[in-house]
Image (spheres, coloured by chain):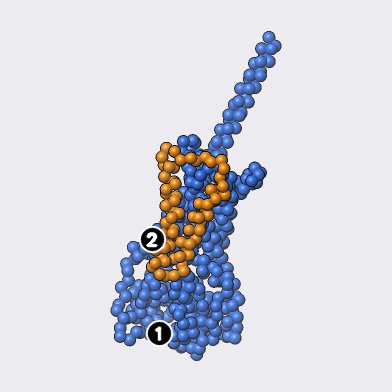
Chain colours: A orange, B blue
Amino acid sequence: MKKMLNNRNTWMGLWGMPVLLGVITMLGLLAAIMSADATWHAVSWVLLAIPLYVMIRYGIPFFRR
Amino acid sequence: MKAQTIRNWFNIHKWTSLVCTVFLLMLCITGLPLIFYEEIDHLIHDELAVSEPGPTPLTKDVVLQAAMDEIPGKEVKYIFWDQDHHPGQMFVTLADSAEAPIEADHYLTMDEHSATVLETPPNEMDFMLVMYYLHVELLAGVPGMLFLGFMGLLFFVAIVSGVVLYGPIMKHFDFGMIRTEKSNRLRWLDLHNLLGIVTLAWASVVGLTGVINTLATPALESWRAGQLAEMVAAYEGQPRVKGELSSLQAALDTAQAAAPGMEVSFVAYPGTLYSSNHHYAVYMIGTTPLTSRIIKPALIDAKTGELTDMRDMPWYLKTIFVSQPFHFGDYGGMPMKIIWALFDVLTIVVLISGLYLWFARRRAKAEQLKRMVKNAESAESLTLSTIEEDAE
């Protein structure tokens, strides 16, 4: 089983993922708006799909009881 | 963080959330179909067939005349174009007079290539318009719009306080852990924390740009009273232009020449809210998702056809217009719309789980109180019986 309790969470351990996902989301939003170009649109979709994937990946155990 | 500080932030999170949640749920639910406005609109209304362009394009004057002949005795208020989604079409708004209220407007969709009427859509609310007006103003005009803006602000405070609480709660846990083996309440709390922290950036951007959008009406009012009035100051007090107006096509060409690289979005006729008594106001827009939100009005004398002024809009209007696409998510094709919808649904889950946590906490507290009262009572009877025993 994955260790869930760690008594010494570093700043990065606590905020690393939230900050990373926030930056990815913002880049995803900006990528599409800066140009009407198809490549940038695709970049934007990929970036925005990352936080969605993370929510599904980590959210699944909620349904396993 | 001190226990008292955490308690304060908890209370801020609780109360801002409780006040705005119902409205936020409404916004998320009505926003869902609005993301797909275009697609749903296409489903409900048949695609209009625009005829092939002829060898020489018809002037807009000819197309407009055909619209005016369709409903005689009316005046033109506005003309719109939508090159991206409805090329070859020209949307004309006619009314008894330029000052007439919008409820009595007549809409005509014109075929620019044949100067024929494609459609005269009724001026009434349909499902999507009800969704739109609920979402934008709770069907309650500008006060409703500003009220929703305030709810959006509370939502943002709830997001910020939620992030502050995320620290102490997650201090000893790995990112994304969901405790399923303990109580239901912990399971939901963990889900709330996970979805809340991951949707943070999206929800903040969409929430804040939504708040900014609610300021559009007062900002436009202020622009009309300020910059627009300044631009037409030389014509102040003059009566409405009467009789034959200068050519519409010429006005469009003049505006186009003055703003190269931009295209015409709409024209406001003399006497309407967005022009003077004496001008065609030709509103030019850029051609990328971002610049298409930056509007530049060119004022053209509706008698002489001369360009009298053209200015950039003030920064506050630019800010509002530029922030709009970040709210709509309509600038990155279909996948982006689906992504927007998924984030919207996950925000609904954050709201509902938050509401559940509030109920569950209250229930837990009530049960705890009951237990304490019960314990106190049994303790009391115990004491009483001891006293009685002692008395014997």
Residue A28 x/y as whole percent: 46, 61
Q: Residue at x 50, y 58 (%)?
A: A23
Identity of the residue drawn at 63% across and 22% down:
B379
Name the element at disc 2. helix
Q: Using a 10 Å C-alpha cutoff, classify the residue at mark 2 as few (fewer than 14 neighbours), some (14 to 19) or many (20 or more).
A: some
Q: Residue drawn 60% across and 46% down? A: B10
Mark toward the start of the polypeptide (2 vs 1): 1
| Pick the front one: B98 or B54 | B54
Question: Residue B142's x, y, as percent?
Answer: 55, 64
- Judged left or right of residue B14, residue B95 is left
List the residue tagged with mark 1. B61
State which mark lies toward you, 2 or 1.
2
Query: Which of the 4 image quarters holds residue B116?
Result: bottom left
Label disc, if present, on residue B370 of the rendered structure: none
Picture residue at 58% right of the left edge, 72% below the top? B315
Task: Name the chain under label 1.
Answer: B
Label 2 lies in what chain?
A: B
Q: Is residue B157 above or below residue B70?
A: above
Residues at marks 2 and 1 on the same chain: yes
Specify the amino acid type for callout 1.
Answer: Asp
Give the tally of numbered discs. Answer: 2
Measuring from the top left, give residue B55's x and y in whole percent. 30, 85
Q: Position of residue B47 (x, y in %)?
A: 32, 69
- Name the mark on residue B335: 2
In the displayed structure image, the side of residue B116 where residue B247 appears, left or right:
right
The crowd level at tag 1 (other Cα within 10 Å; few <14, some 14-19, many 20+) is some
